[in-house]
Image: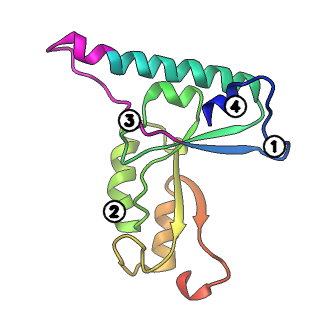
Amino acid sequence: MFIFLVNPKKTLCPDTDNLKFTLDFMAQEYPSYGNTDLRMPAYQILLGLYRIFESITNKFPNVLFEGCSGGGGRFDPGILYYMPQIWTSDNTDAVERLKIQYGTSLVYPIISMTAHVSVSPNHQLHRITPFETRGAVAMSGNFGYELDLTTSDTIW
């Protein structure tokens, strides 16, 4: 995916105005104690990732790039410069999202947290949550829907 986007001979689909990246890399704060040789490779990878995103966002300034986080593991202050919104967690259960979004909001701007109304019962925990609750929780972030509108029994 990165090679396709960075290659100047290729272009994005002209209709693309939003692109979500799933980053399988733990961007986190590394402790200042211990063996610096073990921390350095992760830091270098993160700097390389920023260089890639610098190139991509400069090449496609009108595309909104969204990051994807696994419970906050790839949600870091530096990436917000390139991706102003990040999917906070793959866990879409409204009750669980309350804790996830609250914790993230202690450090990051609320508008940077993408939050969606998903199906009920939730596909991960099988919890049945009212539509109003799922909507209220999702509205406490960058609001959206993650639903199949053709199956109304899973929406309401």
Alpha carbons under labels 2 and 4: distance apart: 35 Å
User: What amino acid does circle 3 point to?
Assistant: Val
Which mark sits nearer the N-terminus, 4 or 3? 4
Can you tell which of label 4 and label 3 is closer to the viewer? 4
Callout 1: 10 Å neighbours few (<14), some, many (20+)? Answer: few
* SS for callout 3: loop
Q: Is residue 103 left or right of residue 35?
A: right
Callout 3: 10 Å neighbours few (<14), some, many (20+)? Answer: few
Query: In which quadrant of the rendered view does residue 18 lie?
Result: top right
Say which residue label 1 marks. Answer: 13
Can you tell which of label 1 and label 3 is closer to the viewer? 1
Which mark sits nearer the N-terminus, 3 or 2? 2
Callout 2: 10 Å neighbours few (<14), some, many (20+)? Answer: few
Q: Where is residue 114 in the image (x, y as percent from the top left)?
A: 53, 50
Q: Quadrant where the C terminus lies?
A: bottom right
Q: Nearer the viewer, residue 3 or 86?
A: 3
Q: Position of residue 3 (x, y in %)?
A: 64, 29
Looking at the rendering, the stretch of residues picked out in magenta corresponds to: 22-40
Can you tell which of label 2 and label 1 is closer to the viewer? 1
Alpha carbons under labels 1 and 3: distance apart: 34 Å
Say which residue label 4 marks. Answer: 5
Residue at 42% x, 52% y is: 89
Residue at 21% x, 14% y is: 32
Say which residue label 3 marks. Answer: 107
User: What amino acid does circle 1 point to?
Assistant: Cys
* SS for callout 4: helix
* SS for callout 1: loop
27 in magenta: yes
Q: Which of 139 and 124 is in front in this view?
A: 124
5 in magenta: no
Alpha carbons under labels 2 and 1: distance apart: 36 Å
Disc assigned to residue 96: 2
